[in-house]
């Protein structure tokens, strides 16, 4: 399978797990089941059950290290399922299903809650300091 399809499957697996604990889950769950079910009611129903099991596993894992382990396992599981789906399709079907998966990923990203961190360093003194992080950092120094 070509690298682009593997990347789409990986991102799709991550998106499914990311959405499982959010308010967007109902829509994502339906879309994912439709993509995986490929128009067959029985398959779609089975995928809905798998998706529900994913959410239940995440909820039962709680927080911390157990949650991270569960997320890693579930992302890998969904990536594998999506890769298998793409492998089973004909060359003509793959681009359409890949586009559906990309739309699902974009939907999850659009509906993901914005995460922000606020640090208050009022009256702090920094000498020979470094601040390390990733993502967007907005630093305001009030003197």
Image: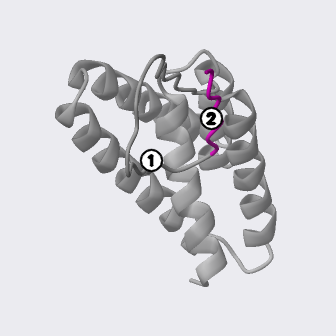
Dot 2 lies on which element? loop
Q: Which mark is residue 34?
A: none
Q: Which residue is drawn at 40% across and 25% down?
A: 55
The residue indicated by pointer 2 is 139
- In percent of width and height, residue 28 lies at 64, 31
Depth check, front residue: 71 or 119: 119
Image quarter for residue 32?
Answer: top right
Can you say whether 1 is above or below 62 in the image?
below
| Count of numbered circles in the view | 2
Badge 1 density bin: few <14, some 14–19, many ≥20, Cα 10 Å: few
Depth check, front residue: 112 or 141: 141
- In percent of width and height, residue 9 lies at 56, 62
Residue 33 painted magenta: no
Q: Do the residues labelled 1 and 2 touch (CB within 8 Å)?
A: yes
Residue found at the very far left of the displayed protein: 66
Residue found at the very far bottom of the displayed protein: 2
Q: What stretch is highlighted in magenta?
A: 136-143
The residue indicated by pointer 1 is 131
Magenta stretch: helix, strand or loop mostly: loop
Can you say whether 4 is above or below 63 in the image?
below
Q: Residue at x 59, y 81 (%)?
A: 3
Q: Residue at x 75, y 44 (%)?
A: 106
Image quarter for residue 31?
Answer: top right
Q: Distance between the residues labelled 1 and 2?
A: 10 Å
Left or right side of 59 for 37: right
**Comes first in the chain, label 1 or label 2:** 1
Left or right side of 53 for 82: right
- In percent of width and height, residue 99 lies at 79, 59
Depth check, front residue: 101 or 123: 123
Q: Which residue is drawn at 74% across and 54% down?
A: 102
Image quadrant occupied by the C terminus: top right
Image quarter for residue 15?
Answer: top right
């Amino acid at each position: 399978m070509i690298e682009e399809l593997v990347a789409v499957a990986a991102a799709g697996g991550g998106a499914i797990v990311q959405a499982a604990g959010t308010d967007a889950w109902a829509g994502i769950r339906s879309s994912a089941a439709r993509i995986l079910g490929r128009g067959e009611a029985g398959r779609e129903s089975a995928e809905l059950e798998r998706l529900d099991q994913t959410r239940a596993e995440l909820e039962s894992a709680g927080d911390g290290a157990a949650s991270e382990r569960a997320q890693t396992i579930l992302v890998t599981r969904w990536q594998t399922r999506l890769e298998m789906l793409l492998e089973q399709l004909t060359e003509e079907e793959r681009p359409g299903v890949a586009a559906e998966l990309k739309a699902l990923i974009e939907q999850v990203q659009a509906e993901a809650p914005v995460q922000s961190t606020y640090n208050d360093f009022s009256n702090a003194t920094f000498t020979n300091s470094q601040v390390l992080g990733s993502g967007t950092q907005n630093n305001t120094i009030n003197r």
